[in-house]
Amino acid sequence: MKRALRGYAGPVFTRLLKLSGALLIVLTIAGDVLAQAAQLHRNLLVLDSHVDIPLDYATDKKNDPGAYDAPLLFNFDTAGQGGYGCVFLIAYTPQGELDGKSTAEARFRFAGNRLDGIERMCAEYPNRAALARSISDVKRIRAGGRLAVAIGMENGYPIGEDLSLLSHYYERGVRYLTLTHNGHNRIADSCNPPDRPYPSGENPDADATRLLRDLYLAEARAAGPPPPLHNGLSDFGRRVVSEMNRLGIMIDISHTGPATVEDALKCSAAPLIASHSCCRALCDNPRNLTDEQLKAIAARGGVVQITAVPSFISFPAGKHELQEALLGKAGALEAGYDSLLELYENDRAVYDKISSRYLASVAEVDSLYPSPGLSEFVDHIDHVVQVAGIRHVGIGSDFDGGGAVTGFAGPADAPAVTAELLRRGYTPEHVRMIWGDNLMRVWGEVEDVARKLAKK
Ligand SMILES: [Zn+2]
């Protein structure tokens, strides 16, 4: 049959046949990997250590993870499609002034509001989700087919200088605390200056707000690292770390400055986590961890959860320069202000005109330097594995907080991450470690340390 065809159709046809055969093999392998990934997903714990929630979570259709058309990347539908078994929802507080009054206000307005939201969500959907206070809770809730919701508190700012608040937050279910956000607090130094507050009432997704975010970032980059306040952990911060060890709250060093990471490694009796960070060697962003930091965290048994925030995954120097130049051009304007920020604050009409011009050129930048995708995201996982070992890496997407790349754009894409890992030669056992077992091991060790300290 083959010979007859060859005789009839000649070499072109033969080549086509060979090509289609090769294609078939490639497709079969790709299909196998996807099928294997899907199969694996049914049998492993998919744990995402960092998913943000809006204020007033689970109060109306817009912020309700059970609403069919909720605009949140993370909702019950997408979590189900991705096979999520455990998620850390985040009670985030932006950094504010360090005085007692500002701290007390922020405590209720942000951390308190979001903790209420998580409780409300679990109460509204008892058949779909439940709060996990321990690793055995995660296993039990998952075995019952529900989503285990754990809580991470991002920024220790609401604690102010009141150590007793840690017990309060522990009682409410907080199982990790990110010591700082952007900006120093009473506990420790951050790797970044505080974010400039967006004007109230602005839609955070609006183009004008995104431009502001770019401007603030450019400003922060130009200013360099913030001058230290404590040179790492403050004296109070050391007591916070000890108290977290005693209670069994994981210490999260994402967002903290290098001296804070060093101090936390020295002070903590339990391993540390980085709930959402990437590798500095692959992307020079102050939020990312150097190889030395990766090794030091691993040496103490900790875990680094790679995040899907595009500017942490890759930010080529050329893109950076072009963006700055465009910002400069947009800023050197006829309006007579020194910067776009100043213009924003003084003349919205002219600002809006200029910002739309700038945003049009940003689209050009985006086409010249496309955003990173799934492959670049997994490169960061590879890097931690190479530098620190397979036991010390996990995934913390930062969905609904700036995380999302093409190919891992929401929880539903989790099997695609697994498929990419399998394609790169990771075994099912490796994938299991990356997706959840590593973080669960660290959480378990943190629980053990708390139990031991309680016996003393
Ligand atoms: Zn963050």
Image (tube, rainbow, N blue to C red):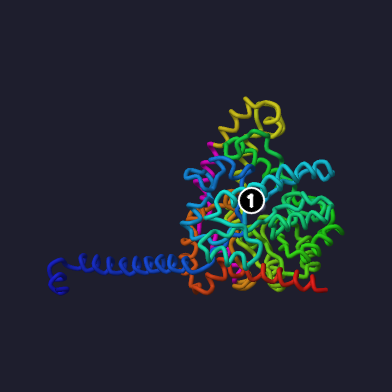
Instruction: Check the picture and name the quadrant holding the C terminus.
Output: bottom right
Q: Residue at x 65, y 27 (%)?
A: 348
SS at circle 1: helix
Q: Describe residue 181's horizontal placement relative to residue 410 as left or right.
A: right
Residue 296 screen position, x and y as percent: 72, 70
Q: Nearer the viewer, residue 164 or 406?
A: 164
Stretch in magenta: 360-385
Asked whether residue 347 is in view, the answer is yes
- Quadrant position of residue 15: bottom left
Instruction: State whether residue 252 is above or below residue 93.
Output: below
Asked whether residue 316 is in view, the answer is no
Q: Which residue is mark 1?
A: 119
**Callout 1: few (<14), some (14-19), or many (20+) C-alpha neighbours within 10 Å?**
some
Q: Describe residue 310's horizontal placement relative to residue 241 as left or right.
A: left
Instruction: State whether residue 106 is above or below residue 288.
Output: above
Q: Residue at x 71, y 48 (%)?
A: 111
Instruction: State whether residue 281 is above or below residue 109.
Output: below
On whether residue 361 falls in the magenta region, the answer is: yes
- Quadrant position of residue 105: top right
Q: Residue at x 56, y 32 (%)?
A: 356
Q: Describe residue 292's horizontal placement relative to residue 145 as left or right.
A: right
Q: Nearer the viewer, residue 11 or 296?
A: 296
What secondary structure characterizes most of the magenta part? helix
Q: Describe residue 184's horizontal placement relative to residue 336 as left or right.
A: right
Q: Residue at x 60, y 29 (%)?
A: 352
Residue 16 screen position, x and y as percent: 24, 65
